[in-house]
Image: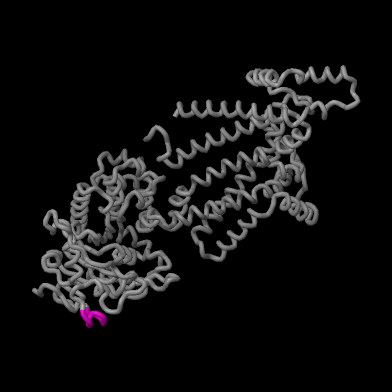
Amino acid sequence: MLGYFIQRCLQAILVMLVMSVIVFVGVYAIGNPMEVLIPPDAPQDVRNFIIARFGLDRPLWEQYLTFLGNVFVGDFGYSFVYNMPVLDLILSRLPSTLELALTAVLGAALIGVPLGVYAGYRPNAVSSHTIMSLSILGFSVPTFWVGLILILTFAVSLGWLPAGGRGETVTLWGVEWSFLTANGWSHLFLPAINLALFKMAMMIRLARAGTQEAMLTDTVKFARAAGLSEATIVLRHVLKLISIPIITVFGLELGSTLAFAVVTETIFSWPGLGKLIIDSITNLDRPVMVAYLILVALLFMTINLVIDLIYAALDPRLSRGGA
Amino acid sequence: MSEPLLQVAGLSTQFHTQAGVVKAVSDVSFSLERGQILGLVGESGSGKSVTGFSLLGLVDPPGRIAEGSIRFDGQELVGMPQPDLRALRGKRIAMVFQDPMMTLNPVLSVGTQMTLAVRAHDKVSKQMARDRAVEALTRVGIPDAGHRLDAYPHQFSGGMRQRVAIAIAMIHSPDIIIADEPTTALDVSIQAQILHEMRELAKDSGTALIWISHDLATVSSLAERLLVMYAGTIVEEGPTARVLRNPRHPYTRGLLDSLPATAPPGQNLQQIPGSMPSLLALPPGCAFAPRCSFASEVCNGDVPYLVTGPSAFRCHHPIGEAK
């Protein structure tokens, strides 16, 4: 198990290294950030001074190695635009995205999986057909449109919920959180729903397909023959049988929501990572982009590792090292 | 002798599919005494398993029991509400399936599956249920049962897995165990062990067995009475020794002739020409007539079930002679 863990960590470091090279070269190719940052009418000596200050007069490989050396001591560099350490910048935005993504993905799973299991258990019931039609809707309607409609309905017409922002926050472990206040929840609600719809549709379809298949197995027949109640069969046998694909998608969705909730964050002016990366791309703020994408890679790999560990716990056949 | 433990009369189970009505079981009648071992023989698709599932009220939709009666210990099972049937399943009538790899849930420990089976009928504490599980595993010959309880099905060998399934079936000391080809997926040497153990266990606890198999050889070593099924109907029944020595129905004869043990070494095995008719379109009269070398005009009309003493057969041209 420990060897496996170390192997995964080495793999993660390698991926992050490759990632940083690609992003570094890629951003370099897009354009010169100085064209955006320095006013066109600045005198030449000021120009040179700024370029030298950011180290942009050096050849690309030297810039990269300097960057890499700094990363190893925990310094991801300074943002060109915000003029603050990139790490602080990202960490200040992370909690708001974290709570939004977690609320959305958890909510999607907690609602979607039971609905899907029900639809799979009674595939021919009218209510199941309704659930499945709704899930198709959740798949096909674009996020930005749903977001606008949600704002139009609940914020503008009904006036029940705020249209954007984070609302009141409470400090916990030195970080601001919205989910600990009622006002924060009212701000969190609409963007979370907007993000959750697609994921919920996916959870419904996954859970339904799994349940339908599981109900036909001899395992379920044998459990019925032993006199187990239908509730016990579904809750103890079926739910565990279908959990692997659901956990997989849960992890992937959590990762992608954390990294790329751009549309929703923009519509609801949620001050999260998605907005940060879009702004950085527009401003060619390379240190932020590089650090951000490395962080995303790290995030995905951490989530994948955790999911692999959960697999082993859920299905003993997959655990390494045997009994 | 008063009423038998189980009395099946005129049982017909049909599947209503888009292609038409599949008559999986037609007009099956038999009875079973307490502690008796009954062999139900026939080739694949002859309706043996569906007969077994009909007894438990576990015929999967779109199948249903079209007519007939199943009287078990004074109660009519056909038309009994599912909750009442559930209370009988596992408690008084249990079932063991063909492939223990498929019937045991791979992601639940053996102990969990056994305690679920115990607590499906008896509201006892978890610890008590575990104790009974250990007892049941010990009874079927699993060494060190206390420790094996936390193991998962894949950590057992094929024979041990089937023993676990049998232990689950026997955990409530049922009146009847329906064994649906429980040794087919096992090695021959293990088969013999399981056969022997099942017989001993049934004898010790006074449990009646309905042993379903396509393998005349295994059944005949175990069963006191044999039922031979073909295309959903019983074509012959009688005491095992009589059926083997003096089969009356040409199909039974054909089955016996195709056993490897009866053919001289080096010669081709006898086979029954042709294949079983589709259960969607059974020929009128005797379903075996198209494959039968004795068939004549009369075989296309109704074939009565001739009962003489403990034996019965359904044929206009019986072979051998009545005793």
Q: Is residue A19 left or right of residue B249?
A: right
Q: Residue B161: within the magenta?
A: no
Q: Is residue B7 left or right of residue A218?
A: left
Query: Which residue is the extreme one toward the left?
Result: B323
Using the rendered view, name the quadrant where residue A93 is placed.
Answer: top right
Residue A42 in the image: above or below residue A110: above
The image shows residue A220 at horizontal and vertical percentages of: 40, 55
Quadrant, the N terminus of chain B: bottom left
Q: Residue at x 19, y 67 (%)?
A: B252
Quadrant, the C terminus of chain B: bottom left
Q: Residue at x 68, y 31 (%)?
A: A292
Q: Residue at x 33, y 58 (%)?
A: B90
Q: Residue B301: within the magenta?
A: yes
Q: Which residues are magenta?
A: B296-304
The image shows residue A196 at horizontal and vertical percentages of: 64, 48
Residue B283 in the image: above or below residue A299: below
Residue A141 in the image: above or below residue A102: below
Q: Residue at x 26, y 53 (%)?
A: B184
